[in-house]
Image: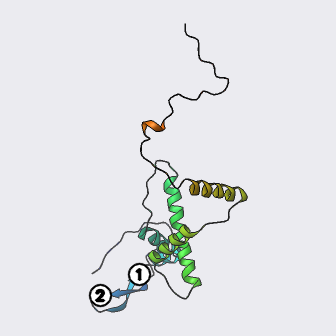
Amino acid sequence: MTSSQKVAGNNGTTQPLGKAKRYNRKERKSVLVPQPKVIFDYNQQMEGVDLHDNGIANYRIRVRGKKWWWPLLINLIDSVIVNAWKIHGLANKEKMTQLQFRSYLAMTLMKFEGTETQEEKQICDIEETVNQESTHLDYGRPSKDSLPNERAKPEGYKAPREK
């Protein structure tokens, strides 16, 4: 099975023909096939960009937004995740698939608590106190007996004059 591709450019020629290693399914082994120089140069200049784009496309974050910058932000986040996965693979002996890495990253971010400032600690303490005091909450409608007969008027309140 052969396929032909059209390539346009102003910086390459088809000659000389080089050799490229491709896998042949029928023979179940790698074979050398002729390759134009312009294709060889293109592959040399890609330097993994196509692999990076493939990594983004495999597990793209699918969120839509109305702002013009939203797709840029999502693509940036995808790019950062793919780069982190590549660095993780270089730094560690045990290899993870990208899906495993994304799951690990999500779980790690959900567990992250960060450092609290003094104000945040005080707010958390107040919330805990309120939650402990309000354990007997009844979310039903109050009975008629529980409502006051007259509204309490604030001190210094003057009723409007009737005309």
Q: Residues within 10 Å of mark 1 (few under 14, many from 20)?
A: some
Quarter of the image with the C terminus in it? top right
As drawn, is 123 to the left or to the right of 137?
Answer: right
User: Which structural element holds mark 2?
Assistant: loop
The amino acid sitting under disc 2 is: Arg
- The residue positioned farthest toward the front in the image shown: 145
Q: Is residue 105 visible?
A: yes
Query: Residue 72 location in percent, x, y?
Result: 52, 57
Marker disc for residue 136? none
As drawn, is 142 to the left or to the right of 125?
Answer: left
Residue 13's place in the image compared with 131, above or below, is below
User: Of 135 and 118, which appears nearest the observer?
Assistant: 135
- The residue positioned farthest toward the right in the image shown: 118
First reached walking from the N terminus: tag 2 or tag 1: 2
As drawn, is 4 to the left or to the right of 43?
Answer: left
The amino acid sitting under disc 1 is: Gln
Tell how many labels: 2
User: Of 111 and 90, which appears nearest the observer?
Assistant: 111
Query: At x 44% / y 57%, what residue is drawn?
Result: 63
Query: Residue 44 location in percent, x, y?
Result: 51, 78
Q: Are marks 2 and 1 in contact (CB under 8 Å)?
A: no
Residue 3's place in the image compared with 34, above or below, is above
Residue 80 picture quarter: bottom right
Distance, label 2 to label 1, CA atoms, is 19 Å
Q: Is residue 12 visible?
A: no
Residue 157's place in the image compared with 32, above or below, is above
Quarter of the image with the N terminus in it? bottom left
Query: Residue 134 location in percent, x, y?
Result: 55, 53
Residue ID for mark 1? 35
User: Which structural element holds mark 1?
Assistant: strand
- The residue positioned farthest toward the top in the image shown: 163
